[in-house]
Amino acid sequence: MTEKKYVPKSESVVYAVAALGQGLVYSCMSSYITDFYMNVLALNAWFVILLMLFARVWDAINDPLMGMIVDRHKTKWGRLKPYPVITILPIALLTIMMFTKPWGFDVSEKSIGMYIYVAAVYVLWGMVYTSSDVPFWSMPNLMTPNHKERAKIASYGRTVGGVGSAVTVALPIILGFIPALAGREDFNDIKYVIMAISMTVIGMPLFAMSSFKVKERIDLPNAKRKDPGEPSTLSRIFHCKPLMLVVLAGILSFGRYMLQAAAPHVARYAGFYIGIDPATATLEQLNKNMSTVAMIIQICTAVGMFGAMVFLPKLYEKFEYRTLMIVSCLGGFGASLLALAVGWIFKNLWLCIPFFIIMAIPLGVINVVSGIMVFDCLDYMEWQTGYRDTGLGSACQSFVNKLGNALATVAIIAMYLVIHLDVSKLNTGGDAAINAAMSLTSGQNFAMYSLVTLVPGVSLLLTAIPLFFYDFIGEKKKKVMNELGEKRKERGIEISE
């Protein structure tokens, strides 16, 4: 395969900035939807679990369908480029609706109509998001035929997109240190509305840049409907062993989302207090303490995750993708056990900072490297079958990411149910809410703390297992990539400058 570079630096920068915009909005859902549903709307826990599971069942249909649309249809503006700009307004509107108390409903009554509204907004958000996410993360496949250049573009995109996620995560925490907001009983309502509006207003225009400034250089023919007796598109996907191993590892890595998604819950209910006496603390002091605890966990997560992302392009030159994934996951598992033991024995989060940082390293590695490995698997499948299912392959990645977020949400809510944490008592406002939070047992506090230590650690350990069987590396990969370049020439696939 040629080592020629096709993509100018300015175009790579635009793609990364677009990923930043997407990250600003996606992180609203991935990091805070559980806290909003459980501790602002105080929804029934079983409803939230069933909603997440139903949405993922629908995604199993919706995501591949979007992939097939991308593979089978090319517009005059390109195969992938139109979708980000088309979807920015509905994504923005639905994100704001998702984090605003349902209009026209009395939230305290928990009417059937309100539950239908919440479910409809969540499912519609997922459908529209898929319509932009699958084409956007497929773009590096068509920007360059050079797999090394493609890996760098995807890596930079994921890294800068992660910066967007960190900004979103930080905003509600920062708002907790503003006295005029932290002292209000409706603080949680306000902070999520501010987050949703500000992140969509900033993020969506940035995301739309990819529709105008990215060039599709590989002109793939439209995927045709299968002839009688020919394997279907889904059959080719499921028979691609390397891709299935990456997908399985992605599903098992759901716990990586919990360092961010569970941080607000740990800050509320794990019993960590920094610089205050909980017995005499005011509502403003407790809200600030929650922000402090969440901030410690989130900053550690950001340092570990982005530190890994920054160094990954250099590490690609020395280590296989598989090796980076396995080593980081095993290291994260070990660090999770230390964070659990040290944090709980000494009841001090400051001592856990190095362990949280190490735990977050595989977050950065998995977020970036798994996507690049999917691209490689699509190359392998094209070499093996003669078909390039670009959109459907990226749909697998989109589905895995959303499934991981849903499983993390389910794990958090399941913990509420297991330890009998009744949010209806904890969200009564004022002194009653403070007293209810103070009445949690040590066992309940420990269980909540395990959501950012033991649970993600075990998930990382499981993630490493299927990767030991991934063999599309070394000389085998070089051979396939060289032969693929020749096969593309024979098939008349055009590559523009």
Image (tube, grey):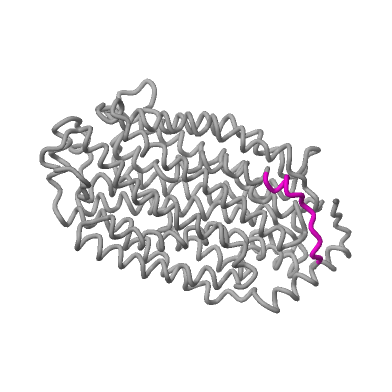
Residue under the point 62% across and 53% down: 156
- Spot occupied by residue 319 in the image (x, y as percentages of width and height): 60, 73
- Describe residue 56's horizontal placement relative to residue 183 as left or right: right
> Looking at the image, is 362 positioned above or below residue 286?
below
Q: Is residue 143 left or right of residue 297?
A: right
- Measured from the top left, where is residue 217 in percent x and y? 80, 50
**Left or right of 428 in this view: 149:** right
The residue depicted at 23 percent of the width and 40 percent of the height is: 423
259 over 454 or under it: above or below: above
Instruction: State the quadrant of the N terminus.
Output: bottom right
Q: Residue shown at 85%/68% (left/top)?
A: 486
Q: How many labels does the image show?
A: 0
State which quadrant residue 487 falls in.
bottom right
- The percent coordinates of residue 202 (x first, y second) are 55, 32
Give the magenta part as a residue range. 2-13
Q: Nearer the viewer, residue 114 or 365?
A: 365
Image quarter of residue 346: bottom left
